Image (cartoon, helix red, strand yellow):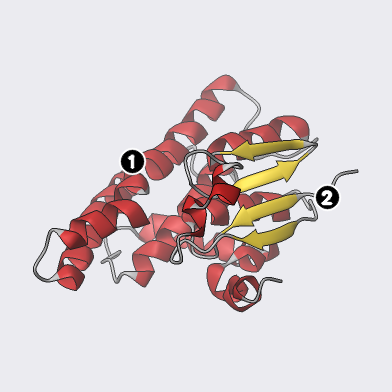
Amino acid sequence: MDETILFDYWRSSASYRVRIALNLLEIPYRSVPVDLLQGAHRQPEHLARNPQGLVPALSIDGQLLTQSLAIIEYLAETRENSRLLPSTPLERQRVRALSHAIAMDIHPVCNLGVVSHVMRQSANPEVARLAWMHKFIGEGLKAIETMLGCPETGKFCHGDQPTMADLCLVPQIYNARRWGVDLSACPRTTAIADRCLDLPAFAKAHPDRLAPAIDAGR
C-alpha cells in the first residue's frame, strides 16, 4: 500500500483540519512541511501538487488530493464508520453549512495572503492586522454561536460525535485565541472546541504540539 503523505504547514487551518481527520480515522501518515513564510508553496515542486499554491495536499490511495473539505469528505466516503458526516441528507446539510461558514466565510478572509495585502495598505501594519482579525473572526464566530443554538447541537457541533464541522471549528478557535479575539459572546462555541481538544486525535494535531517536529522536517 502506498504511503500516505500530508504536505502541510503547522499553523495552516486547512492542514490542521486534515490532520485531525487522519488522526480520528487512525490513518498513519507522514508529514512533509511546506513553509508558507519562506514561500515554499509558490515553488514549482509544490505547484505541481497544487496549482493554487495552497496547503494541504494529501497523497493517499495512489492519488494526490487538495482542498481540505474535499479531502475530509473523500475520507468520510471511503473509510468505514468514519462518522465525519452524519447518515441523513438533512444532517449532512447542517454539518456542511457549519463547516462552510467557517472554512469558506471566515478562514479565507483571514488567511496569510489576504492579511499580508491588508498590512501593505496600512501605515501601521500590526494594528491593521489585529483590527482585521478581530473584526472578521469575531463576527464570524458570533454567527457560528447562533447557528449552534439549536437542538441538533450536542456535546459537539452536531450530536455527540465529532464531525467535519468540529474539524473546522477547532482551528478557527485556535486562530481566534492566537489573535486575542474576544470570545465572551461565544460560550457554546468555545466549550465545544475545548471538548474536542480533550480528545487525543485533536490534541495530537494541535499546531503548538507539532511546530518543532514539522520545522525540523520530521
In this rendering, the count of numbered labels is 2
Q: Label 2 crowding class (10 Å Cα cut-off): few <14, some 14-19, many 20+?
A: few
Q: Residue furthest front?
A: 44
Amino acid carrying label 1: it is: Asp
Q: Residue at x 56, y 60 (%)?
A: 34
Q: Residue furthest left?
A: 123
Q: Which residue is mark 2?
A: 3
Let me know if residue 192 appears in the view: no
Q: Residue at x 11, y 63 (%)?
A: 122
From the top left corner, tell me how far across and down residue 38 is, in percent: 46, 66
Amino acid carrying label 2: it is: Glu
Q: Residue furthest right?
A: 1
From the top left corner, tell me how far across and down residue 179 is, in percent: 31, 69
Q: Which residue is mark 1?
A: 105
Which circle marks residue 45 in the picture?
Answer: none
Q: Residue at x 37, y 69 (%)?
A: 177
From the top left corner, tell me how far across and down residue 46 is, in percent: 57, 49
Let me know if residue 68 appears in the view: yes
Choose between 160 and 50: the one closer to the eye.
50
Choose between 90 and 154: the one closer to the eye.
90
Q: Residue furthest top?
A: 89
Q: Quadrant of residue 164?
A: top right
First along the sequence among labels 2 and 1? 2
Q: Secondary structure at mark 1?
A: helix
What is the spatial separation of the Cα atoms under label 2 and label 1, in whole angstroms?
33 Å
Q: Secondary structure at mark 2?
A: loop
From the top left corner, tell me how far across and down residue 14 is, in percent: 51, 50
User: Mark 2 and 1 residues: CB-CB less than 8 Å, in contact?
Assistant: no
* Location of residue 5 with respect to 88 vertically, above or below: below
Quadrant of the snapshot with the N terminus? top right
Q: Label 1 crowding class (10 Å Cα cut-off): few <14, some 14-19, many 20+?
A: some
